[in-house]
Each structure stands twice: as C-alpha cells, then as structure tokens.
Amino acid sequence: MNTPAFSLIMFGGTGDLAMRKLLPALYQSYLDDGFKPTSFVMCAARSDYSHETYRAWMNDSVKQHVKERFDEAKWQAFLLHIEYFRLDATNVESYLPLKQRVESNDNERVFYLATSPSIFEPICTGLAAHGLNVNARVVVEKPLGHDLKSCQEINDVIGRVFEEKQIYRIDHYLGKESVQNLMALRFGNSFFEPIWRRERIANVQITISEELGIEKRGDFYDETGALRDMVQNHLLQLLCIVAMDPPASMDADAVRDAKLAVLRSLKPMTQDEVLSNVVRGQYKAGTVGGKDAPAFLDEAGIAPNSATETYVAIKAEINNWRFAGVPFYLRTGKRMPKRMAEIVVEFKPVAYELLGKTPQGSNRLVIELQPEESMRMYCMAKRPGNTMRLGPVHLDMDSDDFFTERRMDGYERLLLDAIHGNLALFVRRDEQEQAWRWVEPIMNTWQDQSVAPKLYTAGTWGPAAANALIARDGFNWHEEL
Ligand code: BG6
C-alpha cells in the first residue's frame, strides 16, 4: 500500500466537483490500493447532514460516475472512510471540531477548496485561526479569478496563510496520463529533440473540443466563457508542455520554470492582432451526436443577448529561439462534432520534391490525448506498383497495445500527488498570473471593441473564420485533410 495515511478535508463537499470527479477518483484509488486505517475524507458543507445521510446521498450521486469497476463490498468499505462535516465557513468557531478531528492523528493533511473563490478568505482565516495551516497542503481549483487582478487578489488571500510550497493549484489536464506521456515522448527519446524547433516545424495545432454544451452551469459559464474556462489554463498548459525546453530536472520548480519561460515568451497581442488572430464564436441551435442541441442563448442561465463565447481559435506566437515564427493554433469549443483533445505538430516539407509532389502536412506527428490515447507519425511511402508514386501512411503507437495497466483519471493522479506532496503537476502562482497577463489583451479588446461572437451551428467545427485564420498562413486544421 503506497498511499500514506491522509486526512483530506474537502470544502464544497456537496458540490458537483466532489460528486462527479473527486469522490469517484478517490474510490478508484481505493480499489487499487486501499486506504490506511486512519485515512479519512471529510466532506464539509453548509447543509445539515449526518454521516449516514451524506453517505446515502453519495451512493446515489457518486456511484453512477464510478462505472464498470464498481464493487459493492469495496464500496461499503470505502464509505467508512467518508465523513460529513457541517461547517459555517464564515464562523471561526465552527472550525473547532475540524481541528480536533484533524489533530487526532499524524496523517498527511490536505485541504481541498472545491468552492467558489469568494469563500476562500473565510476558509483560510478559519483554518489559520486554529493553526490548521501548519504542516498542511491546500488544493485550489480553477478558475482562479476572472482576470489578472482578481487572480492576484485570490492568490494573496491564500498566500497570507499558506506558503507557496503548500499551495497546489490544480489544472486537471496536467494530471492526464497522455499529457505526461507527451513529456516522456519529448524527453525520453533522442530523435525528437533535433527536429523540435523552428527549422523543422511548420506549425503546431492544439485542439480541445467537446460535444457537451454548458450543462447546468449556465450562470457560471455566462460570466466565464471559453477563453477563461479553457484557454487561460488547459490550452496554455498544453502549449507549455509542447514548447518548453527540457527542464534541468523533473523537480517541481525546474518543470515550472521551464513552463514559465514559455509563457513569458508568448508574444503579447495588440488590439489589431487580437482582431485578426483570435476568433470568438458562439453556438446556435444544431445537432450533436444525432440529438437536437439548443442555441447557447436558449440555455438556462444565459442572458438572452449574451456575447459570451463558447468557442475560441487563436494564432499564438512564441518569441524565443526555438519557436520564433512558428504559429501555434489553439482552439476549443463546446458543441463540436466530437469530444477530442489533440496536438498536431506539422513538419516542414522536404527541401526538394525529388519524388514528386507531397501534399501539405504530409509529415506530422498527431498526439491524441482523449478520448483515446495514441500517437501517429504521418509519413510518405511508395505506393506498390512499377512507378514511384507516393502516398501517406502513418506509424501508430496505440498505447493500449503497450500498456495494459489502468490509466488514472487526471483528478485521481493529482489528488494522490497532493497527498504525497508532489507539486510538479500543479501550477505555480507566477505561471498562472503570466497566463492571465497574456490572455487579458484578448478580453480587453473584445470588451473595448464590442466584438460579438461569430455564430456556428452546434455540431460543427466552429465559425468559418477559424478556417480562414489558419488557411491565411497556407495550413489546414488537421481533421480537414
Ligand atoms: C473544465 C471546464 O475545466 O474542463 C469545463 O470548466 C470542461 O467546461 C472541462 O468541460 C473539460 O475537461 P475534460 O477532462 O472533460 O476534457
């Protein structure tokens, strides 16, 4: 059993994140490894539940997210490690029973703030008032703020009570097995490094598309939009991992320094550049996966004239020696034809077409992060026959063939890392703030110039302008080949 004894206190214990992601992730881990007898998860929230009522509720809500690995006997044993704690987060006195419970053992202490950042301050104050900020870690969720200033304010609030090395800012994309595999690919093989640079790479495309709309999160989403929800964090983190220099070591700070260097090299955009290099989109009614999907403006919680974007495509540039002049095209959207996360590295064409014409993009590395995990290297090869005719083939590394072990979900991996005290896959304050710094001119331009989103039909790949954005440079989005 590798997981040390832990006390995980989850604020927002009745929330969607706890039910859909965190508790199922803990159960998966329990199935593999069990928990030490003193380990417990304390779910704290305002409602007046007993442990039993809460566990019964978990039975209904969490069970459905656990899927095929469900095992009734183990589930019952797992529930014994789950406790409910009624907390008025703003009342310092109400933390006293929490203190007593936490101090009843020497477990690793992790506080998970799965709540709105608006109550981080009382929670941090409540914990510090009882000395619970000492020898503990705190995990915080994105989005942290809605711009640089609000992010700094939240970071200040947490930073008054916890040191940076105690703060675990989660970006669940970094916990995905496939994202770590990208690092393995880049830094565990010798043949990519010499070609991983401007001399050989024509462009990089990073796509995260979702079939889902905004589900029941209308109020949140209308204030947030795709730029803040996906680009500022997940897409920029993926970009960092593709573009960073090999870190000095795999220590948390070395990895985070390397990512920060990329964020600092991202070319800031002027208003004119935002207008020509960023596409803002919003879905109208359409069909996704054979089902009718309403327009964003008709979803619950959305203002009837909302200009919030559900789609963004960006041409970003990195001003450093490795990548100057190489466009990085980022795009993400809701209500797309399929759920997918993919990184495409397109290499430059051969210097001289000795064997006849090769189509644009015939050499590319396609890394699929989800739903499947695979890597394909697109090459040209001779078609059989008595003439030298070339055709595209791909060399596949389908990791199902290589690795049969279960792959952890991002949250599971990151929760375990927080329990183990491994910070490498969490975002440091300076990285997070730098990402806001780069994104802000886009938000500001949209606001100053009242940039209305371009409409796209639900179930399509976004506004036509996103195709024009990449076609202008002589390239195509990968799936359109
Ligand atoms: C979250 C966003 O961070 O990531 C959601 O808030 C989005 O809007 C989700 O649906 C996507 O994550 P995944 O792991 O399903 O690709």
Image (cartoon, rainbow, N blue to C red):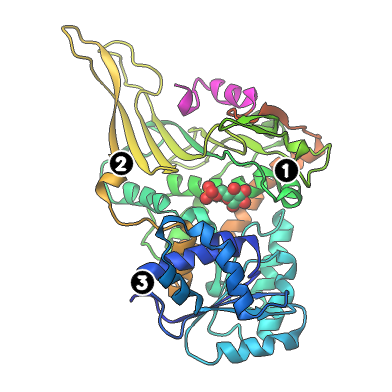
Q: Which residue is mark 2?
A: 398
Instruction: Give the mark nearest the N terminus, 1 or 2.
Output: 2
Q: CA distance from mark 3 to mark 1?
A: 45 Å
The disc label shown at residue 443, or none? 1
At 69% from the left and 85% from the top, the residue drawn is 95
Callout 3–callout 1 Cβ contact below 8 Å: no
Relative to 180, say whether 50 is above or below. below
The disc label shown at residue 33, or none? 3
Residue 465, image quadrant: top right
**What's the residue type where badge 3 is placed?**
Asp
Q: Is mark 3 within 8 Å of ligand 1?
A: no
**What's the residue type where badge 2 is placed?**
Asp
Instruction: Give the mark nearest the N terminus, 2 or 3.
Output: 3
In this picture, which residue range is highlighted in magenta?
463-481
* Viewer can see residue 131: no
Of 387 and 252, which appears nearest the observer?
A: 387
Q: CA distance from mark 2 to mark 3?
A: 27 Å
Instruction: Give the mark nearest the N terminus, 3 or 1.
Output: 3
Callout 1–callout 2 Cβ contact below 8 Å: no
Return the x and y of residue 103 as percentages of the image width and height.
55, 91
Secondary structure category for the residue under label 2? strand
Q: Is residue 475 magenta?
A: yes
At 70% from the left and 66% from the top, the residue drawn is 154
Q: Quadrant of the N terminus?
A: bottom left
Q: Nearer the viewer, mark 3 or mark 1?
A: 3
Q: Quadrant of the C terminus?
A: top left
Of 357 and 387, which appears nearest the observer?
A: 387
